[in-house]
């Protein structure tokens, strides 16, 4: 399901759709509707109640020299080089591995709403990670992240999410939207490790409990029962 984000009300529409489980790509908002499948479950971290685990604290310590910079959504050759390295190492068989610089620029710059490209740099000012991030009325939305594939021990993907939690608190916002939790997918299941979190079930954001996360028959998101919630921008 796809809808275009255009006009003066694009921000307000994006806010309402995000609360209803949609995601943004370029100037559209989308939600997966697959016949016979409801595996993609919207998930968000409750930032003001989030507590770092021992593992999270270790990751923060391992990245003590890392600095984050909120940049405007402008594509650079430096970013694209890192993006290519990440795609080839992590998703070499995927469509994004073949993206040109112009494709990458469109992904970053084609946005009708308030968007940042958060750059993560090490002590030598080398770009080691980036997170395309949307500002919402009630939080931050992680649109797409990529990082240096040779620095796996630093868990830069997790560190970027922890940074988003910290930033939402500084901004007085309650949530970090992580997109879709797919319990059966090793590449997407990690999102359930950030607690407390809420998942959208039947049109209601519901706390993700241990029993839900460990269920043999994971919960599903029936899109037809998830109306767009009417909220102000």
Image (cartoon, rainbow, N blue to C red):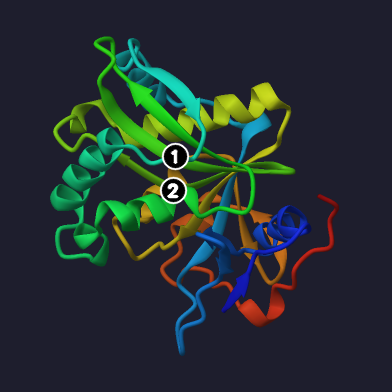
Q: Which residue is mark 2?
A: 108
Q: Are marks 2 and 1 in contact (CB under 8 Å)?
A: yes
| Distance from Cα at disc 2 to Cα at disc 1 | 6 Å
Q: Which residue is mark 1?
A: 74
Q: Which is more toward the observer, 114 or 184? A: 114
Q: Is residue 167 above or below residue 6?
A: above
Q: Residue furthest bottom?
A: 35
Precedes in sequence: disc 2 or disc 1: 1
Provide residue 9's location: percent of width, then percent of height. Answer: 78, 59
Residue 224 left/right relative to 211: right
Q: Could you tell whether 95 is left or right of 28 in the image?
A: left
Q: Position of residue 60 (x, y in %)?
A: 38, 19
On residue 96, the disc is none
Tell me the element at label 2. helix
Is 8 left, or right, of 135 in this rendering? right
- Residue at 70 percent across and 78 percent down: it is 225
Which quarter of the rendered picture does the N terminus lie within?
bottom right
Residue nearer the viewer, 212 or 23: 23
For label 2, count other residues whose C-alpha is less than 10 Å away and answer few (under 14), some (14-19) or many (20+). many
For the residue pair 22 and 193, the one nearer the viewer reads as 22
Residue 157: x, y in percent? 34, 37
Front tag of 2 and 1: 1
Provide the secondary structure element on which disc 1 rests: loop
């Amino acid at each position: 399901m796809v809808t275009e984000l255009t006009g003066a009300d694009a921000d307000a529409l994006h806010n309402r759709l995000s609360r209803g489980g949609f995601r943004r790509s370029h100037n559209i908002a989308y939600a997966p509707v697959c016949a016979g499948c409801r595996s993609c479950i919207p998930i968000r971290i409750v930032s003001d109640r989030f507590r770092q685990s021992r593992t999270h604290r270790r990751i923060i310590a391992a990245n003590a020299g890392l600095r984050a910079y909120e940049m405007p959504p402008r594509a650079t050759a430096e970013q694209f080089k890192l993006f290519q390295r990440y795609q080839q190492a992590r998703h070499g068989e995927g469509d994004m591995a073949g993206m040109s610089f112009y494709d990458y620029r469109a992904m970053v710059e084609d946005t009708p709403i308030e968007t940042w490209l958060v750059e993560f740099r090490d002590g030598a000012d080398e770009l080691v990670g980036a997170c395309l991030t949307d500002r919402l009325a009630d939080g931050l939305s992680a649109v797409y992240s990529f990082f240096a594939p040779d620095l796996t021990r630093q868990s830069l993907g997790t560190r970027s999410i922890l940074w988003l939690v910290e930033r939402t608190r500084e901004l007085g916002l309650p949530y970090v939207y992580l997109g879709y939790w797919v319990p059966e997918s090793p590449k997407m299941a990690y999102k359930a490790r950030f607690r407390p979190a809420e998942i959208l079930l039947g049109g209601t954001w519901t706390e993700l409990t241990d029993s839900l996360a460990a269920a043999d028959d994971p919960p599903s998101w029936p899109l037809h029962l998830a109306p767009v919630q009417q909220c102000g921008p």
